[in-house]
Amino acid sequence: MISVGAVVLDDIGRDEARRKAVEELVKPEYQQESLVGRLFRTVQDFLDSLVDRAPGGVPGGVFALVVLLLVVAALVALIAWQARKATRSRRAAADGLFGPRERTAAEHRAEAERLAGESRWAEAIRERLRAIARDLEYRAIVAPQPGRTADELAEATGRELPRFAAELAAAARLFDDVTYGEAPGTAEGYQSMAQLDEGLRTTRPAVSTVASP
């Protein structure tokens, strides 16, 4: 037997019990309900609705409370993850292609090999493309450009070395994936970047000749 105010509920269904409870609550003595009380009642109604849908008629509000807590926790985790991702992307964009440190091509290349030896593929890929960019600038194949992106590097180099254009575009996409898209990077990805680096180091732009009149 359940007592709600002056109403006695015995052997009646949930819907009927709720109707009786509402009738009881609309009495004058309940009209001074505070804002906090109304908010609590709204939340309780939501929990009750979850319990109504629960299979097997789980007693009390335990099931609904657990579901609600899981949903809230998932939303908080999603928001925090998105915020961290946005922060890392902004930081990486601010650093540009070369990152926060000024290094030579040889230094970037050595760092890439060290990171690859530790299977830190995303970082190794970034350093290897930085080595490529520094080497291209040092050999005057492309002009130095502050704030240059990987895509801009690929486009500028592709104009000077057309046979590498497709590989450079793929390398730029890979760099963006591991830098902004948080892709983990792979050994195969690093090997493709290293092979591109070696191929570019032994290549010179074609020299066009103009016939004399």
Image (cartoon, helix red, strand yellow):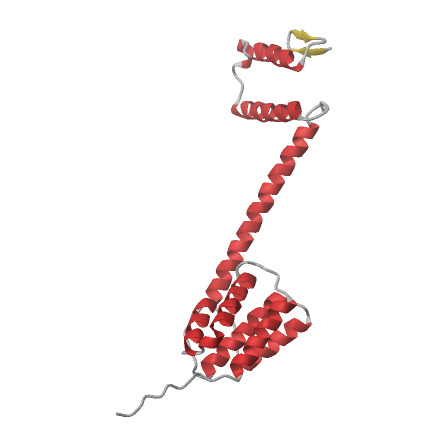
Question: Is residue 110 among the parts visible in the rendering?
Answer: yes
Q: Is residue 81 above or below residue 161?
A: above
Q: Quick one: quadrant of the C terminus?
A: bottom left
Question: Is residue 100 among the parts visible in the rendering?
Answer: no
Which picture quadrant has residue 196?
bottom right
Locate residue 170, reporting x and y percent: 52, 67
Residue sitting nearer the eye, 213 or 23: 213
Residue at far bottom of view: 212
Q: Is residue 141 above or below residue 21?
A: below
Residue at far left of view: 213
Locate residue 44, reporting x and y percent: 61, 24
Q: Is residue 95 above or below residue 42?
A: below
Q: Residue at x 58, y 76 (%)?
A: 195
Locate residue 28, reporting x and y percent: 53, 10
Callout count: 0
Q: Is residue 181 above or below residue 12?
A: below
Q: Quick one: quadrant of the N terminus?
A: top right
Locate residue 178, reporting x and y percent: 56, 63
Residue sitting nearer the eye, 31 or 17: 17
Q: Residue at x 29, y 92 (%)?
A: 212
Q: Is residue 149 left or right of residue 70?
A: left
Q: Residue at x 44, y 74 (%)?
A: 158
Which picture quadrant has residue 113?
bottom right
